[in-house]
Amino acid sequence: MSGHLTYQQAGVDTKRAARLVGGIGAHVARTQRQRRLHGAFGLFAACYDLSAYREPVIMTGCDGVGTKLELLLERGMLETAGKDLVAMNVNDILTTGGDPLLFLDYIGIAALDEERITRLIAGMADHLEACGCILAGGETAEMPGLVPAEVIELSGFCIGCAEKSDLIDPTTVRAGDVLVGYASDSIHANGWSLVRKVLEQHPGEVDDEELGAWLAPTRLYHDVVRDLRAAGVKPRAMAHITGGGLPENLERLFRGVGADLEILPWQIPGIDKLLRHVDEHDRFHTFNMGIGWVVIVPEEDVGRALSAGPGGRVIGRMTPHEGVRVRVADGPTGNA
């Protein structure tokens, strides 16, 4: 023994990390069934051949799982965390009219844990395989002394591409256009700081089954976009309903017009136990309220939009009056 320290003694095991990269190969391969990298996985950067596009425009996005991650880690729902990470990024790319091509992840952890990391990757691969997006690489950072042992830091990055002529142009939105909303699968991955506060202040009120329903993975809306394309429908605009809820995520799309919306009561187990403790106005600006995706189309495309993906229904119309006003059928009203 020389008495000199090694990297492993400092808490970082590069050889173990290299073995992990090899161990997740089967999950990576699942994401290359519809598209393939140009070159091998595992190089210092990933390449993708865009020559199939005539006038390619690329788009990028970056997002995480937010404070929902704390509860997912506590309950061992690692696959769900991986799915949430992908959906939060891929859905944003889809709003542009782009194809999600490449996804990269960042995982920060105190010390390598092959089982936990592999489960995260497996969840990512499930959603990526479903939408034909490649797990192109990422970074797993061992940070002993900086990241607590029970914590995992998680971020995602997505690159998409579209033909210039296929890009969605929200400036085409007009008064009279129809908003079709598509159901969310859960609270998704926004608003969890407020959810956690409610759970902290009212312990035992929400049971495990109800909390499990709230924590279900964020829905991917690639099926809606795929079906719209197959039906020949090019929406005026599309919105992923995340932090800020329906009002803020829709208002960012248009100027000089607004929308009046009526949505059905949110139907997931125990959600009334959450909403009874949340300000009646603020809830509309925090949660998706049961609508995770909105497509704005002219009247003549409504029927085809309703047939795109499950859970679609007309939720309102564009008006000449600025602002988004949301009403729950037979329920409270929130104004933006």
Image (cartoon, rainbow, N blue to C red):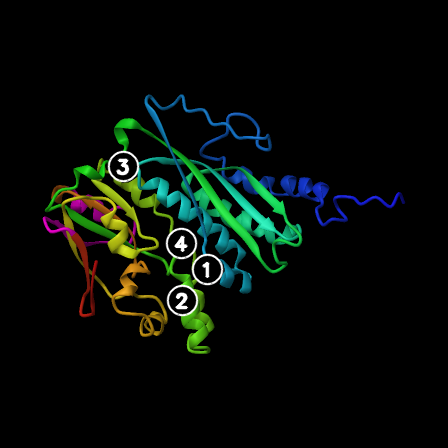
- Mark 1 neighbour class, 10 Å CA radius: few under 14, some 14 to 19, many 20 or more: many
Name the residue at 38% across, 23% down: 52
Q: Where, quadrant-wise, is the C terminus in this rendering?
A: bottom left
Where residue 262 appears, x then y in whole percent? 18, 60
Observer-side mark, 1 or 4, equals 1
Q: Secondary structure at mark 2?
A: helix
Count of numbered circles in the view? 4
- Mark 4 neighbour class, 10 Å CA radius: few under 14, some 14 to 19, many 20 or more: many
Q: Secondary structure at mark 3?
A: helix
- Mark 2 neighbour class, 10 Å CA radius: few under 14, some 14 to 19, many 20 or more: some
Seen as rendered, the residue at the extreme right is 1
Observer-side mark, 3 or 4, equals 4
Q: Is residue 182 shown left or right of residue 19?
A: left
Amino acid beneath label 4: Thr
Where residue 199 appears, x then y in whole percent? 43, 72
- Mark 3 neighbour class, 10 Å CA radius: few under 14, some 14 to 19, many 20 or more: few
The residues colored magenta run 301-322
Q: Looking at the image, is mark 2 or mark 4 earlier in the sequence?
A: 2
Residue of label 2: 195
Q: Is residue 284 shown left or right of residue 16?
A: left
Residue of label 4: 218
Marks 1 and 2 close (CB-CB < 8 Å) = yes
Residue of label 1: 68
Residue of label 3: 230
